[in-house]
Image (tube, rainbow, N blue to C red):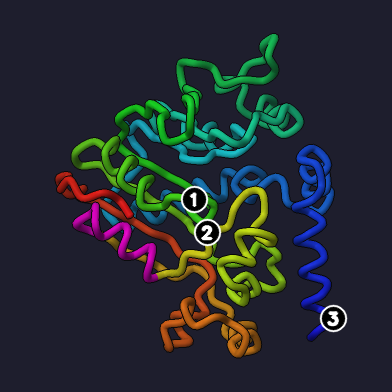
Amino acid sequence: MALARLHYLTQRLVRNWLPGPVAAWARRRLGGIPGGESDAPEEFADHYAETLAREGESFAGRAVLLFGHGPSYGMGCALLQRGVTHVYLFDPYADPDDLLNRRWLAEYPGCLEETSAGIRPRPAGMTEIGAGETPHEAQLPVVDLVLSTSVFEHLDDVGLWVDKLAGITAPGGCQVHMIDLRDHFFDRPFEMLCYSEAAWTRWLNPRHNLNRWRLDQYEEAFRRHWSEVRIETIGREEELFAAARPRIRPEFLTGDPKIDSITEIEVFVRGARPPTGEEAR
């Protein structure tokens, strides 16, 4: 156990000290890039469609914001094939990856095109949104549907983004967010919960940021802005949680192992509440 912890700490510190381009290369070599939705967009699009169908919703005729779409345009292409009228792409941190997108250019020639800047979306179907001076200042369009996969756990101000995304969702619109609660060394999904805020912030938090929010915090944030909030558990690791439990800091525990062992959730929201003037926490 001590050796495993030393291995974890060494990897975290080395990755954080590496220069950015070297760290990105290392993550790619270790399989950290791309994410699942970048590599298998059809599968994730089908999953979103199933979630929407359960709620009496669909893609048909809707404008969609992909929040944090990553380096790939594959998901946007898959959504256009399913009846979405327009896809808006917003990701202030991930640059397009031509190596990934050449695959989707071949598969979806009507959605992408080769330009002097590389492979880019055809503007009739997709629009990339710039980040502005800071990500929070981005001018996002009003859309009918907001989707994200493994994005919220990386945000440094979840409340602000819940508020902002609620504000750009049209009346009658909805959102679906898949959120990964694990440490992204996935064989040790609860390890990040074993360190103080000071140690995590100063030494261990990766460049792409893990905010360490838990289920109850997400539920509270979404319920402040939406009248309908449904959260489905899509991953749980009870045995790994039991092994890590003695070391997990008390602020991350509810006392219910069924809740505390949850590793992945899907959030569906509908019915944005009118603004109250209260600042998002």
Q: Name the residue under label 3.
A: 3
Q: CA gap, disc 2 to disc 3?
A: 26 Å
- Percent coordinates x, y for residue 6 in the rendering: 82, 75
Residue 73 located left or right of residue 50? right
Q: Which residue is drawn at 64% across and 67% down?
A: 199
Quick check: marks 2 and 3 in contact, CB under 8 Å? no
Q: What element carries label 3?
A: helix
Tell me the kind of residue under disc 1.
Asp
In the picture, residue 281 is in which quadrant? Answer: bottom left
Please say whether residue 223 is one of the residues in the magenta stretch: yes
Residue 5 or residue 84, whichever sits in front? 5
Looking at the rendered structure, the kind of residue marked 2 is: Asn
Q: Which amino acid does label 3 sit on?
A: Leu
Q: Name the residue under label 2.
A: 211
Q: In this view, does 164 lie above or below 229?
A: above
| Residue drawn at point x = 77 percent, y = 70 percent | 8
